[in-house]
Amino acid sequence: MKNNKNFSDFFYRKAKLLKLKSRSWFKIKEINNREKIFYDNIKIVDLGSSPGGWSKFASDYTSNSIIFSCDILDMDYIKNVFFLNVIY
Ligand SMILES: C[S@@+](CC[C@H](N)C(=O)[O-])C[C@H]1O[C@@H](n2cnc3c(N)ncnc32)[C@H](O)[C@@H]1O
């Protein structure tokens, strides 16, 4: 029996299909469609960024911007994103 919650999660499967870091990419896309928070030539700080859904979205939807991300967990490389793995 497939009782894994994620199995039936539409956005989880969509994220997998599109090779996205996480389904949060769709969440921030929805927020951006409503609030228009991402545009070109801006500075973005993503605190607690891993696995990188929001950073990836920022990278995809802005150009000529500075994206600084950090997390206590490691994160895969994302184009145009400066990542700092913070260790306390
Ligand atoms: C819900 S996840 C963020 C998901 C991310 N926004 C995305 O789009 O993929 C929350 C993250 O916050 C990080 N975190 C929690 N406390 C932290 C701290 N004190 N310093 C840095 N990162 C922290 C966790 O390691 C975790 O990866």
Image: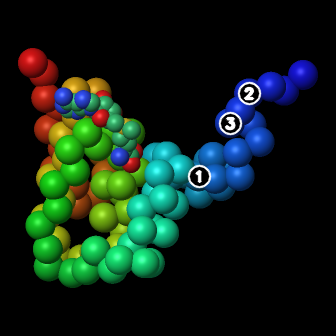
- Ligand 1 lies in quarter: top left
| Badge 2 amino acid | Asn
Residue at 59% x, 52% y: name it.
Answer: 15
Query: Residue 28, how many percent across, how many down?
Result: 42, 62
The quarter of the picture where residue 65 lies is: bottom left
Q: Nearer the viewer, mark 1 or mark 3?
A: 3
Q: Do the residues bearing badges 2 and 3 touch, measured as CB atoms within 8 Å?
A: yes
Query: Residue 76, how many percent across, how many down?
Result: 34, 39
What kind of element bears circle 3? helix
Outermost residue, right side: 1
Front-lying residue, 31 or 61 = 31
> Quarter holding the N terminus?
top right
Residue at 64% x, 53% y: name it.
Answer: 11
Residue 20 visible in this rendered orientation of the protein: yes
Disc 1/disc 3 C-alpha distance (Å): 11 Å
| Badge 1 amino acid | Ala
Residue at 41% x, 51% y: name it.
Answer: 53
Query: Residue 78, how many percent across, how many down?
Result: 31, 52
* Pointer 3 residue: 6
**Among numbered discs 1 and 2, the one appearing first in the sequence:** 2
> Which numbered dot is residue 15?
1
Residue at 30% x, 64% y: name it.
Answer: 59
27 sits left or right of 39 in the view? right
Q: Do the residues bearing badges 1 and 3 touch, measured as CB atoms within 8 Å?
A: no
Q: Is ligand 1 within 8 Å of the beta carbon of the residue shown at mark 2?
A: no
The quarter of the picture where residue 18 lies is: bottom right
Q: Residues within 10 Å of mark 1 (few under 14, many from 20)?
A: some
Front-lying residue, 85 or 48 = 48
Disc 2/disc 3 C-alpha distance (Å): 5 Å
Disc 1/disc 2 C-alpha distance (Å): 16 Å
> Which numbered dot is residue 4?
2
